Amino acid sequence: EKWEQWATGNTGLPLLDAAMKELISTGYCSNRVRQNAASVLTKDLQIDWRAGAEWFQFLLCDHCTAANWGNWLYFSGKGNDPKHRHFRTVSQALKYDK
């Protein structure tokens, strides 16, 4: 259920929901919301980052394997970088969604 809500843009988080609906309808969303989507999926919902990477690979019209999978790995915290990246999606929306 959590996966389906996230993947279809029905989480109740306006920035994320708009991003996922844009991605589904156009094949595109900004890098900032891609990062937020990765954070919510992996940090808040505790779903494996590879599921998100595959979903984005399927939907993105500008898909680049190295960039997509590298970013998902990076933002999920599974790569070499020790920094914990957990976006606060509500405050991100207030700061960037103008």
Image: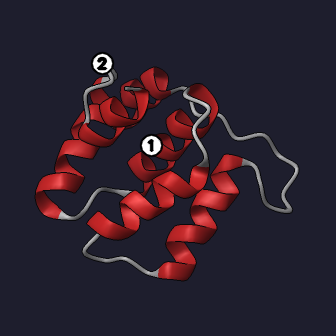
Mark 1 residue type = Ala
* Residue under the image location 19 percent in, 53 percent down: 24
At numbered mark 1, what does the secondary structure look like: helix, strand or loop? helix
Q: Is residue 87 above or below residue 7?
A: above
- Mark found first going from the N terminus, 1 or 2: 2
Query: Could you give the CA–CA distance between mark 1 and mark 2, rounded to whole angstroms?
Result: 13 Å
Residue 71, position as x, y percentages in the image = 59, 63
Q: Secondary structure at mark 2?
A: loop
Residue 14, quarter of picture: top left
Within 10 Å of disc 1 (Cα), the crowding (few <14, some 14-19, many 20+) is many
Q: Name the residue furthest left.
A: 25
Instruction: Say which residue label 1 marks.
Output: 37
Q: Residue at x 50, y 49 (%)?
A: 35
Amino acid type at mark 2:
Gly
Asked whether 91 or 15 is in front, the reply is: 15
Comparing 97 with 49, the one in front is 49
Name the residue furthest front: 1
Q: Determine whether, in the image, residue 66 is placed left or right of residue 64.
A: right
- In front of the other: 1 or 61: 1
- Quarter in which the N terminus is drawn: top left
Q: What x and y, as percent, mark residue 47?
A: 57, 38
Kindly indicate whether the residue at mark 2 contacts the one at mark 1 (C-beta within 8 angstroms).
no
Front residue of this view, candidates 82 and 8: 8
In this picture the colour scheme is: secondary structure
Seen in the picture, residue 94 relative to 69 is either above or below; the reply is above
Q: Residue at x 61, y 46 (%)?
A: 48
Q: Residues within 10 Å of mark 2 (few under 14, many from 20)?
A: few
How many numbered discs sit on the rendered protein?
2
List the residue tagged with mark 2: 12
> Could you tell me residue 80's position as x and y percent?
86, 62
